Amino acid sequence: MNRDIDVLVLGGAGVDTIVYVPELPLPYADSYMIDSGIRTRAGQTGDFVAVGLSALGLRTHHLDLLGDDPEGDLVRALHRDHGIELTAISQPAGTKRAVNLVGPDGRRLSLYDTSRSRPDDRLPEATVRALATASRHTHVSITQPCAHALPVLRETGVTISTDLHDWDGENPYHEPFAHTADLVFLSAAALPDPERTMHRIVERGRARTVVATAGAEGAYLLTDDTLTHIPPATPPAPVIDTNGAGDAFAAAYLYGMLTGQPPHQCARYGTLAGAHACTIPSTETHAMNSTDLLRLTAPT
């Protein structure tokens, strides 16, 4: 079968408004002067994964719902500028958007506008099936339309990854994604016992590999029923913004997987790309390329 696409990214397209605030949590005040500006730019989780994959040289296609609005135009321009194929299904409710408050230490607080979706939103089954059949791998965002696409993806036989982000290990919304994917990423931030949650994902679903990112502490890799701590990578410059670090990690891990690297090396790629992302302002889009990634991991 001809697989013209290396990775099909489902969902996660939208725009963010970035506000750099003096501290988080932000104390109540009547007003704040924001010297760094308030900027709206294209890029949510699916967009950033797609950009990261493309920068690493993988043939990437992104499928999602987009509004016929200025925000949707920003997303379309992002993909066009980075040479990423985009299939945009019309979304009458408009393009997804969020506000990210970013503190001086790079931490963020995200406010998601849930009004840009409807309960009956769906990605067309025929489109999902055709693109998945042409793909080596599919990465699925945890947006509601993508949940309904999971059975179709499984029928095509394509391998699936997903990112559960800051799942608490209990919210049932995340379970179809966690139990359908072959590879699961998640953040350890909201998990009281990351190892327990990672083992439960494996026990209850199809995944044989689970990766929990832990920020400055690196990551935890569960594969072959063995949990390993992956040390953090040293950022190449001061940390200014953690937006997109998890997406960069996932993109680099998938690059390693699709180029035949073992899970531990894939996770090492992820820590390097994630650390690099923390040095880039959210208002810019500059993903690590394969030349830099391989240089950093080359034997000395």
Image (cartoon, rainbow, N blue to C red):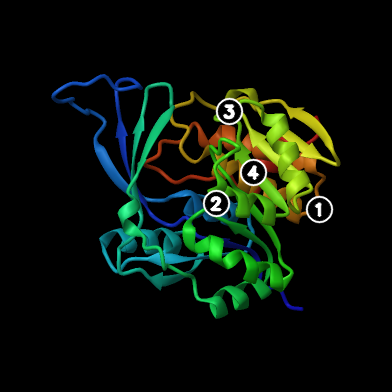
Among the two numbered marks 1 and 4 on one chain, the one whose residue lies closer to the N terminus: 4
Among the two numbered marks 3 and 1 on one chain, the one whose residue lies closer to the N terminus: 3
**How would you rate the neighbour count of disc 4 (Cα within 10 Å): few for under 14, some for 14-19, many for 20 or more?**
many
**How would you rate the neighbour count of disc 2 (Cα within 10 Å): few for under 14, some for 14-19, many for 20 or more?**
many
Q: Position of residue 239 (x, y in %)?
A: 48, 25
Q: Which residue is mark 2?
A: 49
In this rendering, the answer to whether 125 lies above or below 148 is below
Q: Which residue is mark 3?
A: 215
Please identify the quadrant where the C terminus is shown. Answer: top right
* C-beta proximity under 8 Å, tags 1 and 4: no
Q: Which residue is mark 4?
A: 185
Q: Position of residue 142 (x, y in %)?
A: 53, 53
Near-viewer residue (80 or 105): 105
* C-beta proximity under 8 Å, tags 1 and 2: no
Residue 189 in sight here: yes
In the image, taking residue 33 as reference, residue 285 lies left or right, namely: right
Q: Secondary structure at mark 1?
A: loop
**How would you rate the neighbour count of disc 3 (Cα within 10 Å): few for under 14, some for 14-19, many for 20 or more?**
some
Residue 295 in sight here: no
* C-beta proximity under 8 Å, tags 3 and 2: no
In this rendering, the answer to whether 243 lies above or below 147 is above
CA–CA distance between discs 2 and 4?
12 Å
- Residue 260 is tagged as 1
In this rendering, the answer to whether 50 lies above or below 108 is below
